[in-house]
Amino acid sequence: MMKCKYISFTKFFVLVNIIATVGSCSPGPYIKIDSAFGPGIKFSNYGDSFSWAPVDKKDTGDSRADNPQLHELVRNTVEEQFQVKGYRKASADKPDFWIDYRIAAKQKTDMGSHGRTQNYDEGSLVLDVIDPGTRKLIWRAIARTELDNAMPPSVRKERIQTAVKRMLENLPTVAE
């Protein structure tokens, strides 16, 4: 007769969490996120409505950053994530705050192992929340990552969505 070996619920729970965490990690380079409020800013003083800042986007000259599909994906993802946090999109003339963003790519050089330099392209997404009355910065988040031009569009889309979601983690929800 075969004996069954049981493990405790705690060990089982830890094992399931480890598997879920490892399985949910997306492949690719690390995404560094920084965010901060402007000096003396209390976000709860602002309401719950937003619109896009009335700014004309200038081409950067880099086809990766000037891609219209990329801009549409960023805008849709940002709007979706703000709405998840309880904010609502308002008409352009009466928002409590504006949202703006910039996309850039630049070549970086880092000192690698054994004293060798490593050249790579770094992409950044800057997301700003702006007071429409004073035009002062309320909050900013920046996502930076190494670019992989061979990355399939579906993976690129997932990474942008992940980056935007992580960028907004420190922004309070409407209820807070």
Image (tube, rainbow, N blue to C red):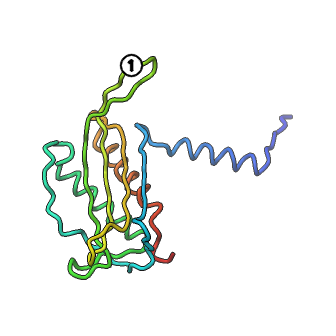
Q: How many marks?
A: 1
Amino acid found under the numbered disc labelled 1: Arg
Q: Nearer the viewer, residue 86 or 37?
A: 37
Q: Quadrant of residue 126?
A: bottom left
Q: Is residue 22 above or below residue 101?
A: above
31 sits left or right of 90 in the view? right
- Using the image as rendered, state which of residue 128 and residue 164 is in the foreground: 128
Q: Quadrant of the N terminus?
A: top right
Extreme bottom residue here? Answer: 94
* Image point (62%, 44%), residue name: 18
- What secondary structure is found at the residue carrying circle 1? loop
Residue sitting nearer the eye, 90 or 37: 37
Residue in the picture at 21% in, 77% down:
92
The residue drawn where x is 28% and y is 56% is 74
- Residue underneath mark 1: 116
The picture places residue 7, in percent across and down from the top left corner, at 79, 44
Q: Toward which corner of the image does residue 95 lie, by quadrant?
A: bottom left
Q: Along the line of sight, which residue is nearer the eye, 97 or 28?
A: 97
Query: Left or right: where does residue 57 sit relative to residue 175?
Result: left
The relative height of residue 22 versus residue 120 in the rendered view (above or below) is below
Image quarter of residue 32: top left
- Binning the other alpha carbons within 10 Å of mark 1 as few (below 14), some (14 to 19) or many (20 upward) gives few
Residue 53, horizontal then vertical, whole percent: 23, 68
Residue at image location 70% in from the left, 50% down from the top: 13
In the picture as drawn, the residue positioned furthest to the front comes out as 39
From the top left corner, tell me how far across and down residue 137 is, in percent: 32, 66
Image check: 86 left or right of 107?
Answer: right
